[in-house]
Image (tube, rainbow, N blue to C red):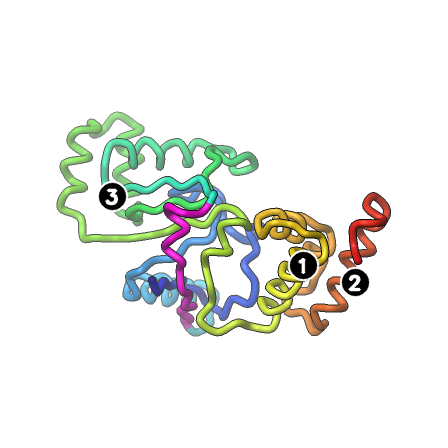
Amino acid sequence: MIVYHGSYTKIDRIDFLKCRPYRDFGRGFYVTKIREQAQYWAERKGILNKTDAYVNEYEFVEAAFDNWELNVRRFDGYSESWLDFIVLNSDSTGLVPAHDYDIIEGPVADDDVAQRIDDYLDGAVTKSAFLKELKFRHPTHQICFCTHRSLQALKPLTLLPRQKIDLEIVKALIANLSLSEEQAIDLYFSSKTYQQLSEVSTENWQDVYNRLKQEFMKNRRSAFS
């Protein structure tokens, strides 16, 4: 499935620290299969940041929904369970996730829906009346990637330099440490080396890998070959 992320810039690296909390499904990287929806958000963000709109394109490996060892939640449409989940995330402090899902799929709570959610929370509209309103909404769609592990199911149609580095390092960790892909991803993306890399790195992946080795040498001297 081809999916899109509307932004004001080309995204070289997905950084969860730059993802806003309090979103529909919490902090995460959001994409949609509806290009027009991504284009709308891109234009909106472009105006706010005084830049051109940019739609980033990815291929989503749909097998991640069922065949990968990921914690997945999917909402088929606007429903009571969807509404309860949106409210759960809006009540979160943003510092601690309100859930432990890797990937979440469902419809969008746009500005109009968000306003009605506030009305519902204030008691101005009942849950049943609100859900009836939602039946007449235009179709919307979003997938939220909440963990680094889940991002492995999201493949840029064109790999940028930084993404090529990430891919090569994960492959090297698997080969040199006999790790599973899941373990290699967790090891690399939780490292200080990864966090300290520049937004657009000019290093080759071997240099970054050597820095990663130095980081872990103190505690795992015999781990790297």
Residue 26 placement (x, y as % from top left): 45, 42
Whichever of callouts 1 and 3 sits on the residue coming sooner in the sequence is 3
Q: Are marks 2 and 1 in contact (CB under 8 Å)?
A: no
Instruction: Please tell me whether residue 30 is drawn above or below residue 93 in the rendered image.
Output: below
Q: Nearer the viewer, residue 114 or 89?
A: 89
Residue at which label 1 appears: 175
Q: CA distance from mark 2 to mark 1?
A: 15 Å
- In the displayed structure, 14 sits above or below 24; it is below
Q: Amino acid at mark 2?
A: Asn
| N-terminal label among 3 and 2 | 3
Assign a secondary structure to mark 2. helix
**Image position, residue 30 (x, y; %):** 42, 54
**Cα separation between marks 3 and 2:** 45 Å
Write the start and end of the magenta stretch as one range.
53-68
Q: Is residue 97 left or right of residue 183?
A: left
Instruction: Identify the disc placed on residue 54.
Output: none
Residue at the image position 32 percent from the left and 42 percent from the top: 74
Circle 2 or circle 1, nearest the eye: 1
Q: Position of residue 22 (x, y in %)?
A: 45, 41
SS class, disc 3: loop
Q: What residue is pinned by disc 2? A: 210
Alpha-carbon span between mark 1 and mark 3: 39 Å
Residue drawn at point x = 74 percent, y = 62 percent: 209
Q: Residue at x 72, y 57 (%)?
A: 176
Nearer mark to the viewer, of 1 and 3: 1
* Tag 1: amino acid: Ala
Residue that badge 3 annotates = 76
Disc 1 crowd rating (10 Å Cα; few below 14, some 14-19, many 20+) is some
Q: Is residue 30 left or right of residue 14?
A: left
